[in-house]
Amino acid sequence: MAASEPGAAPVPVAKLVLLGSHAVGKSCVLERLVKGTFSKFTIGATIGAAFAPHLLQKDGSPYVKLEIWDTAGQEQFQSLAPMYYRGAEGAVLMFDLTSARSFEAMKHWGEELGANGRDGVALVVCGNKCDLVERDPDSREVESEFAIAYADEIGAEYFETSALTDVNVHEAFMRVTDEIMSLRRAQAGDAPLASADPRDRHESIVLPDEDARMGSKPRGGKGCCS
Ligand SMILES: Nc1nc2c(ncn2[C@@H]2O[C@H](COP(=O)(O)OP(=O)(O)OP(=O)(O)O)[C@@H](O)[C@H]2O)c(=O)[nH]1
Ligand SMILES: [Mg+2]
């Protein structure tokens, strides 16, 4: 829990996970959300996983303190992903709009979450790098209608995002967070605001480099550039 000011209601905490194949832009999207920047040359492939806390604001007030796990998409790290998605209340499933292969790989993550994730996990699907398809429509390998159909199938909202040009990043995270909060309310209003078990929140395995890289400054769909 985090309180915004003395006497104020505690700010709820929610754990989110980013899933998708290598180089779809998960870390860049997270950096855009958390720091408001895009590091074209300094972000390398994620090793293991990275953690970033982020205080999401709504209407100028603290809304939810997100604990975000950015998983590594490279093949050799895929077996680690369950550690990060198991306790997650929300997931951002990401693919690259210029890569049909990444779309297929993302469906695999959707299946895994359905089979092994938490019941009633809140989901959004993000087709990232919409700046590229806007600049060159021929580079698009996944049509919006297919992505929307898939998102509908798994009960998710679909966003076309760009970490580079800051399109729909905040909106996608707000959407998945709203969904988490409404699922909590639907659960008779008595669901815990955050896991009391630190193991569920992976507090003991924060990767120092990644944590430092992301920082924790608060900052405050759909089609590309809509
Ligand atoms: N044009 C464009 N490039 C992007 C965007 N997001 C990420 N990239 C580029 O895509 C590449 C991969 O980005 P990452 O954020 O490292 O990808 P990732 O999904 O975290 O990759 P792993 O950590 O290996 O799973 C980098 O060269 C980024 O500069 C975007 O929105 N637009
Ligand atoms: Mg990464």
Image (spheres, rainbow, N blue to C red):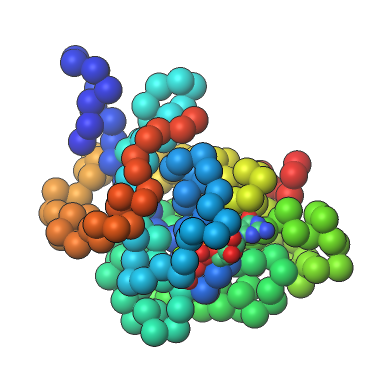
Determine whether 146 is above or below 211 in the image.
below
Query: Which quadrant of the figure has residue 141?
Result: bottom right
User: Which of these two is toward me, 120 or 33?
Assistant: 33
Residue 118 visible in image: no
Query: Could you say where residue 38 lies in the image, as x and y percent from the top left?
Result: 55, 49
Q: Residue at x 13, y 54 (%)?
A: 197
Quadrant of the frame with the N terminus: top left
**Horizontal arrangement in the rendering, residue 226 relative to residue 117 (left or right):** right
Query: Which quadrant of the figure has residue 216?
Result: top left
Residue 28 visible in image: yes
- Name of the residue lying farthest toward the front: 41
Quadrant of the frame with the C terminus: top right
- Name of the residue lying farthest toward the bottom: 76
Query: Could you say where residue 60 lies in the image, as x and y percent from the top left?
Result: 46, 20
User: Which of these two is toward me, 59 or 165?
Assistant: 165
Q: Residue at x 48, y 60 (%)?
A: 43
Q: Residue at x 55, y 60 (%)?
A: 41
Query: Could you say where residue 213 lies in the image, as x and y percent from the top left?
Result: 36, 51
Query: Could you say where residue 29 lies in the image, as x and y percent from the top left?
Result: 53, 52
User: Which of these two is toward me, 192 or 190?
Assistant: 192
Q: Residue at x 57, y 56 (%)?
A: 40
**Horizontal arrangement in the rendering, residue 84 relative to residue 226 (left or right):** left
Total labels: the figure holds 0
